[in-house]
Amino acid sequence: MTSPVTAIHSRDNAFVKELRKLSHDSTAYRKQGRVWLEGDHLCRAALARGLHPEIAVFAESFWPQVPAEWAQAAGKVVVLADALFADISGLESPARMGYLLEWLPGQAPQPGLATVVLDRVQDAGNVGSILRSAAAFGFLQVVALKGTAALWSQKVLRAGMGAHFGLHLVESVEVDALDALQVPLIVTSSHQGALIQHAQLPWPCAWAMGHEGQGVGAAVEARAALQVRIAQPGGEESLNVAAAAAICLHASALGAAG
């Protein structure tokens, strides 16, 4: 089945303006109810997870080379003049394709799942990296408390490298939402708790990762069933939150496998 194709050459086109907002405004997806995936890697990752884009967007020069399955996956195809695609792109080297996916707000935490809790983690690169680690190490859910970088922003999507599509994502919730997890919550500290390699880590569990400068907040820490610390024989005061998350989630995965 061939999807209907629309060619656009005007910068003033309403669709182009909406796409530009999605590409450059980190929270525009919440207003539009759509997520913009730019580049073949993210698009292929979405298709591999069985997602169906509403609209496929291709640069005009790339359109004659587009594999049929990439175009047919969407309900509609838009072909943009190359200059327009470059204008809306958020990349230094613009990709030649993208997908628009429906985004639904109001997701609630699901009980019983291995979860990562993000407590005001503000750097988009850190958030995307943590999502990658979560997906790699068997965690199924990420819950982002208010103050955390927008999970579906372009920078987080690029850093996540497709991890979004294998996770149940909940964002912008209050601390009380953690009560619904129904799994033990673990927090890390530089100074308190057992060394992670000696701790008996429960599975499934929820790991809380905190603000880059302030760490996990008091309201989250008060809910913790376990506190652990990561040995740093080199003497640094603390680890980058994404690096700490990778260590903690890997330790949990090893324990679950064993």
Image (tube, rainbow, N blue to C red):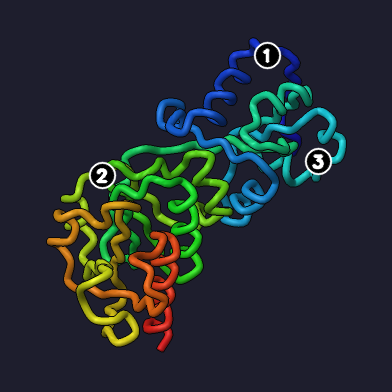
- Mark 3 residue element: loop
Quadrant of the image occupied by residue 230: bottom left
Residue designated by label 1: 11
Residue designated by label 2: 173
Q: Nearer the viewer, mark 2 or mark 3?
A: 2
**Residue 207 relative to residue 63: left or right:** left
Is label 1 in contact with label 2 (beta carbons under 8 Å)?
Answer: no
Q: What's the residue type where badge 2 is placed? A: Val
Number of marks: 3
The crowd level at tag 2 (other Cα within 10 Å; few <14, some 14-19, many 20+) is: some
The crowd level at tag 1 (other Cα within 10 Å; few <14, some 14-19, many 20+) is: some
- Mark 1 residue element: loop
- Mark 1 or mark 3, which has the lower sequence index? 1
C-alpha distance separating marks 1 and 2: 37 Å
Residue at horizontal 79%, vertical 43%?
68
Is label 1 in contact with label 3 (beta carbons under 8 Å)?
Answer: no
Q: Is residue 78 above or below residue 62?
A: above
**Residue 76 relative to residue 188: left or right:** right
Q: What's the residue type where badge 1 is placed? A: Arg
Residue at horizontal 71%, vertical 36%?
94
Q: Position of residue 9 (x, y in %)?
A: 75, 16
Residue designated by label 3: 66
